[in-house]
Amino acid sequence: MARKRTGTLVWRKSGWHARYFAVVDGEEIRVWRDLETTNRTVARQRLARLIASPDACPTFSSESVSSFVDEWIKQREAQQMPCARYERTYWQGYCEEAIGRLELHDLRPHHVQSILDDAAAGKILTSKGTKLKQETIANIRSILFRMFKAARMLELIAANPVELTKAPKLSGDRGKAKPRTYLTDAELGRFLACPDVDLELRMAVLVSRTMGGLRSGDVLALDWTMLAAPSFKVATLPRSKTGDVQEMSIPEAMRPRLKEWWKRAGSPASGPVFPVRRGERAGEQKRPTNRYAKRLQRGLWIAGITRMRPVKDPDRPKRLVPNPLDPLYNETKTSLPVDFHTLGRRGFSTALARAGTNVQTAMALTRHTTARVHQRYVDAQLGHEIPDAAVPTVPAMPEKRRRATVTGCDRTRSPKLRKLVGASGFEPPTPTVSR
């Protein structure tokens, strides 16, 4: 009868080690193994796996990086983490092809650094075929850091390989983010007053612009129970990016418009504020992937809002199209075209700054975590206008008096000259004064 295999835990300076017997080629030998952990409970579990394994030197984590990441993202999606969708997109678009097939315990820092270097060199492109920006590269590193930090906490790997990497700096203008164009109050008023623009689009813009600068996903997630119908005095707004909710009083000017929109929907007790209007999912909540950017630009064109004179369509000369240099509709060298996100959040943040709202209140209303993040949503033109209250009262400043220069002889200032003139009877010439 074969002897039952056992093992012993031994502590060393680097952590726990295992000493056990294993069968190799039909012969029982003694094996010494580094368990790569300082946790006694984890060391016992790994020792039990080593003893039960038929192999002499089994690996602790034989799963691939791709399988671990998929399981990690699924757990975050099950917890309804708001950033899980972006993490899956970044992983599948930029990282899976490079390191997905590697074994988890074989992953090294140079594998992660090669991804960051390729992204900075332009070898990794976006879905539109453009090069990645500095912010995107930094996001790739932060997402990989969170992924392998979880693997380190589970002790599937000895160390986080992303800790020794660094996101390279981009040279030139590619690393600088262009500001996005947003509507002025006059342009927004013309857009909201145009009857030819879709009423749902105008209502969504109005809600986002006046109620905390909601993102498009937050607008689509609104339910009538969140707006306390039919009084419409208090709203419980969802914040998908931070994963919390926000209670806010609805402005007085918004209440009759929301009530009218509620009556047009049939005065429902609950349900989405902006539901699907046609198709099999009519009446249900819209998916968060829906965007209002293209519909917004189409609505602005219908309302006749342009900043440069339209040009003729080269294919159809009788038809006018937006000017290629118009910042509202096209990307220029210094700005990006207008979109729903900027119209709501940047417009609301700028309006708070113009109204003199302090930074703490503005950050609470917009749900920004830091003042640096909030400052990015405030129009840069505010920093060019110095308020009159900041300038002291300046009195009239007279010019400096110039000293008179005398040409010729001044008999009134020389006593000796007066004596000579009195004795000789000589009369010197009259002096001329030049100023």
Image (cartoon, rainbow, N blue to C red):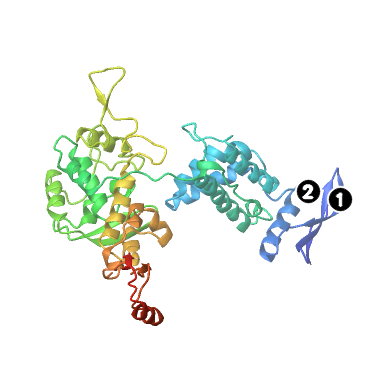
**Of 83 and 26, which appears nearest the observer?**
83
**Of 208 and 234, which appears nearest the observer?**
208
Please say whether residue 83 is visible from this viewpoint.
Answer: yes
Rendered view: 246 above or below 207: below
- At numbered mark 2, what does the secondary structure look like: helix, strand or loop? loop
Rendered view: 111 above or below 235: above
Q: Which residue is the site of mark 1?
A: 28
- Inspect the image, locate mark 2, and give the three-letter code of the amino acid beneath it: Cys
Rendered view: 289 above or below 166: above
At label 1, counting other C-alpha atoms closer than 10 Å, the crowd grade (few under 14, some 14-19, many 20 or more) is few
Please say whether residue 133 is visible from this viewpoint.
Answer: no
Residue 414, position as x, y percentages in the image: 39, 79
Residue 194, position as x, y percentages in the image: 15, 39
Say whether marks 1 and 2 touch (CB < 8 Å).
no
Residue 365, position as x, y percentages in the image: 31, 61
Q: Quadrant of the C terminus?
A: bottom left
Q: Earlier in the sequence, mark 1 or mark 2?
A: 1
Q: Which residue is the site of mark 2?
A: 57
Residue under the image location 60 percent in, 43 percent down: 116
Residue under the image location 23 percent in, 44 percent down: 274
Residue 144, position as x, y percentages in the image: 57, 49
Which numbered dot is residue 244?
Answer: none
